[in-house]
Image (tube, rainbow, N blue to C red):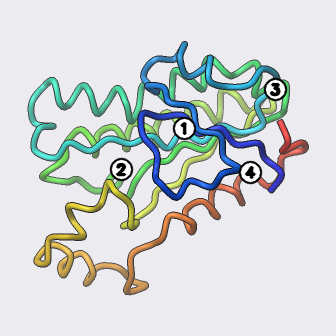
Amino acid sequence: SGYRVCAIGLDRDDDLPAAIRFAKADVTDTEAALAALPEGPVAALVNCAGLLRHQAEWQVEGFELVMKVNLTAGFTLANALLDRLEAARGSVVNVTSMWAIFGSAGAPAYTASKGAVAAVTRSQAVAWAPRGVRVNSIAPGWVETRISEKARTDPERVARINQRIPMGRWAQPHEVATVVRRGLDELEDPAT
């Protein structure tokens, strides 16, 4: 769609397209994330880093780590980029989850973090609209990614999940990316 894309994180999928620049940096280190980005206006920020620690989330350390990656990192980076987003009349897309709507007995921090991302999105949207920065979120359901591998490889659990999916199949990552891209399509200059 004309974007110069820079992905930031600690690891990457082997099939990441060559056109996407990958910068290895901890998203919870705002300065490192900012240093990985090119200078100038930012047309779009997609906060999609996610961490799931299952039962370890019932311990304070696990809970806080998940909150830091899933919520605080994106919030902090968006705030740090606000002037650059405004310069481009840019857009922010925050990735929440279906678990923002209903709970998970095995992942309380993931659930809490994604619910908080949805709430922060609403606050950013109303606060930043006067500056010309649009903020939205998407809440995917079951998607075939590494983070869902534990559920997908448990025959009993996947059978229960599959019964609840109206389309009868798990989403593919490119389908989520298509929704994100459509949310950004109205930007004036996607090259920034």
Residue bearing the label numbered 2: 100
Q: Are marks 4 and 1 in contact (CB under 8 Å)?
A: no
Element class at badge 3:
loop
Q: Name the quadrant containing residue 126.
A: top right
Instruction: Check residue 41 in the rendering and tell me which mark sits there, or answer none.
Output: 3
Q: Three-letter amino acid code at disc 3?
A: Pro
Compare marks 2 and 4 and give the one earlier in the sequence. Answer: 2
Q: For the point 70% across and 54% down, which residue is it?
A: 183
Place of residue 59 in the rendered image (x, y in percent of width and height, measured from the top left): 9, 30
Place of residue 38 in the rendered image (x, y in percent of width and height, measured from the top left): 74, 25
Element class at badge 4:
helix
Place of residue 142 in the rendered image (x, y in percent of width and height, measured from the top left): 36, 67
Compare marks 2 and 1 and give the one earlier in the sequence. Answer: 2
Q: Three-letter amino acid code at disc 1?
A: Thr
Q: Three-letter amino acid code at disc 4?
A: Leu
Q: How much space separates mark 1 and mark 3, taking CA atoms? A: 21 Å
Q: Mark 1 packing: few (<14 Cα in 10 Å), some, or many (20+)? A: many
Tell me: 17 left or right of 151: right
Tell me: 116 left or right of 121: left
